[in-house]
Structures are given as C-alpha cells and as structure tokens.
Image: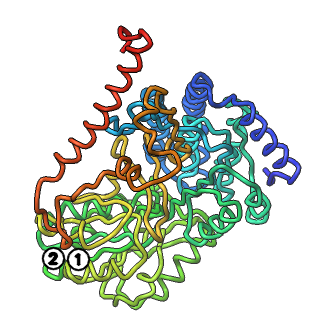
Amino acid sequence: MGFSSVAEFDEAYASVQNVFAKGTTTSKRWRRQQLKRAWWMIEDNKDRISSALYTDLHRHRQESFLSDIAMVQADILRTLEKLDEWTGDEKPTRRDLFNFFGGTVIRKEPKGIALIIGAWNFPILLLLQPMVAAIAAGCTMILKPSDMAPATQDLLLDIIPQYLDRDAIRCISAGPQEMQYILERRYGHIFYTGSASVGKIVHAAAAKHLTPTTLELGGLVPAIVTATADIELSAKHVAATKFTNAGQICLNVNHVLVDPSVKEAFITSLIKHFATFMGSKPQAEHYTHIINIRNFDRLDTLLKQTKGQIVYGGSRNRETLFFAPTIVTNLDADDALLQTELFGPILPILESTLDQAITFTRQTETPLAIYAFMQSTSEKERILTETQSGGVTFNDCTLHVIAKDAPFGGSGGSGHGYYHGPYGIREFSDLRTVTNALPAWMEGVMAARYPPYSDVKLGKLVPVVKPGFDREGNDVSNGGWKRWIVGLGVLGEAWYLGCLCCDLRGWTSSC
C-alpha cells in the first residue's frame, strides 16, 4: 500500500479537527465505546496481527501474543475499569482558605488533536497503547504506523476504519518525505516512539508551535552484575531478554558490566541459556529476525569493527535476515559496540567493578532503564542514588514496564514524558484549574486587598510568620502551630462576619 497523499492527509486532519471542535470526544460514552471497539478490533484480528508480525519480523506467535496483543487488550480493560477515576476532577488541599470557599478543582481536559507515531519493533503495541490513552483523555487523533513494518501497517490501515470512529480517529501511511509535511501542522500533543535522531526532528518540528511532546526513545541500557548477584539466574534473565525480538527493543540490555570475580561464571551461564533458548536447529524457527537489510548491515558492520572476542554466536544470514544472539567479550570501553545503541542481538560484556560500572553509565546519555543484579541492599541504594535512568529493575529485566498503573518513560537522552495507566491520560490532557470567587459575605474580611494600599492592609493580608528554621537550615522551633493559629484566626473572623451578616438579614438558620 502506498503512502497517503497530501490531499488525503489534509482531509484526515480537517476531519479530526472538526470533530474535536464539536466536543464529540469529551463524552465519556464516546470514549468507552471507542475503547470497547478497540478491544474487539484486536480480538477479531489476532491471527491477522500475528501473521503480519511474522511477515515483518519473523516473530513467533507466542511473542506477538504476549507483547503486541495481550498487553494492549489488558490496557484497554484496565482503562475502562478506572476511566472515571483517572479522568475525574482533582481537589487540591482544602486547608487553604481560597480552595475551601472557592471549591477549587483541577479538570483534566483533552489537549486536542494527537499525532501518534508508532515504531516498527512492536508496531501494534507502540501505536495502540498510546492511542488507548488518547481516547481515554478525549482527544481526536491521527495515527501513523511505522512504514518499516509494512505488513502490519497495511493491516492497521485496513482494520482501524472498520472498528473506530472514522471522523475522530484517522490512520495514515507516511514515509520520511510525507512526515515533513505532516509535522508542519499544529497538534495538541505529539507522541513519538523510536530513535533519538528522529526524536530530535519531531521535537524541533513541535517546537515551532510550542506543541508538547512525549518522546519514548532508548539509549545504552546497561545490565550491572556484581559479585553478590545470583549469577545463574542473572544470566538466564539477561539471555532471555536479549533473545526476545532479537534484541530489537528500546528496553533491551545493550551491554553487561560484570564484576571481574564472576565474569567467567556469568559468561558460561549466558552461553548455556542462549543454547537452550535457540534449540538444536542452526536457525531456530521461533527466533525473530532483523527487520530489514539496512539494520542487518548496520549490525554486521558493528560486529566486524569490534576488537573484542566473539565467544558465542556470530552466525548470520543476510538473505533471511537471521542474526544469532552473539556474545562479545574482552573489549575496551571505547569499542565500537559500546558507542551506540545496538538494537539487536549482539551482547558486549565489559569487565567492571560497581564503581567502574556506575562511572561508565553516568558518562553515557541517560538510559531508558538500568538492570542491576545484586543482593546487597547497599549496592542497590548506590544504583538509585548515583545513577539516572527512566526506570530500574533489580535482578531481572523490563519488569518495571509492566508494573500496573506505574509511569513508563525516559529521562534526558532516552526521552521525556510518561504513559501507562493514569499517566497516559495525564499526558494527553491539559490540567485546568477552576475556582470560584469567595462568598460575598467574606468581602469584609478581604477588604484589605483593595486600594488604596497601606502597610496596615499588607499586614492583614500577609501576617508576619517566623519559620521554624534558621538561616543555615537548622530547625529551631515548632513554628507550624503558629501558622495554624493565624489560619484559624482568619477563618474564625470570616465565619463570624458571615454569621453576623446572616443574622442582620434574618438568615441565621442558614449559617
């Protein structure tokens, strides 16, 4: 299927713009209906989705069902269950005079038109999961599947109009040239998953309209293995993660920083588990292949450039795009394999103490995740206090991404913004504070706010309060109770004046 034309995109943009202007998507009924129809869209097309992912990635049905299919459906059901709570108004503290009497609330309102740009490595999950959040928030949207997974792209272009509101949710196809035109338009929010290089292009285009963005990128995600780790289990978890999708995951282990005392044992265990996962055939049928020739050649070049030693794997077939899990060791910190996000099945192993591992990790762009294998509580605390990352999983990989109702996102070079659960809805929502004027009977106590100004009036509005700490930040007294007395005094005076007013007007019974 070819790319959408300029005219087709313009028509799609006008459609979603008009629907949002009418307020159709603000209805909870509309949101629930679209979410339910999205669930059935996936349910009715499970086999077609699995076949398309096999065509694009040679991915086994089990991997596709667990990731692209089951995760989206579970997300839809959870969102339906919690929709009212996650989209409901929030009430800031009622201990504040103005919040209490003004009935202040924080509304979550849809940002408008969302542009959601999917990625090829999980072309269903990474397009539809943000779509679920955008629907729940009440946005209209334009969905752009990855053109690098053409079979899945064509499937999405076929089924989305069949199940979802065609006027409010449009799916278009586009390559790099078409995206230049698409990014010129104004959106309420842009959600992009992919490489940092393209993320910068998206972010620069969004900046022209001051459009907020969510960028889910990647980076040099490390696995740090110390001498206190369960080596056998650590190796098994790292091997299983690297095996998944042939390492083509932004959250995958990019490299391992392992303590010298356990390095050989760790590598031996890695080799054993990779061999078990691959099975007896040279090219396992259940193993995912590289997405295309360009990415295959990129990985092939990196492997040829390394000065390290290949101790396992290395076999590959350009014609079928098969690239076996490959362990490379005895390499230096400046090796080609450690200078870029690999996004493939190559696994460099670098000998490193915990001090060295932390230093190395801090010298790279902030990764999307850190996987730290250790039993020591003090070592875990060092990981949390001395490093930065989008998320952390201890003694396993990627578990933080499936934590229910928890935020997932990057930091620094690995992106910004969060989604999953309530955080996705917040990402596609504007937080609008709404408050009311104080009751008219409080005008007397608030008279000091009006001109002409004076120090006496200022003193009434901003009473002198002494903090409970000195200039060095040391606590010197319990000053909190004084502030409570001031606050209660203001409320008491307001209440007295209000009741007095009511009494004078004969409204005492209503006070």
Badge 1 vs badge 2, beta-carbon distance below 8 Å: yes
Residue 151 visible at all: no
x then y, percent, for residue 129: 52, 43
The CA span between labels 1 and 2 is 7 Å
Residue 232: which quarter of the image? bottom left
Residue 385: which quarter of the image? bottom left
Q: Secondary structure at mark 1?
A: strand
Q: Mark 2 packing: few (<14 Cα in 10 Å), some, or many (20+)?
A: some
Reading the image, the residue beneath label 1 is 258
Amino acid type shown at disc 1: Val
**Residue occupying the point 59% across, 22% down:** 29
Amino acid type shown at disc 2: Val
Residue 408 visible at all: yes
**Residue occupying the point 40% across, 53% down:** 458
Residue 262 numbered tag:
2
x then y, percent, for residue 364: 40, 79
Q: Is residue 299 left or right of residue 74?
A: right
Q: Is residue 446 left or right of residue 175?
A: left
Q: Is residue 165 above or below residue 221?
A: above
Between 150 and 196, the one nearer to me in the picture: 196
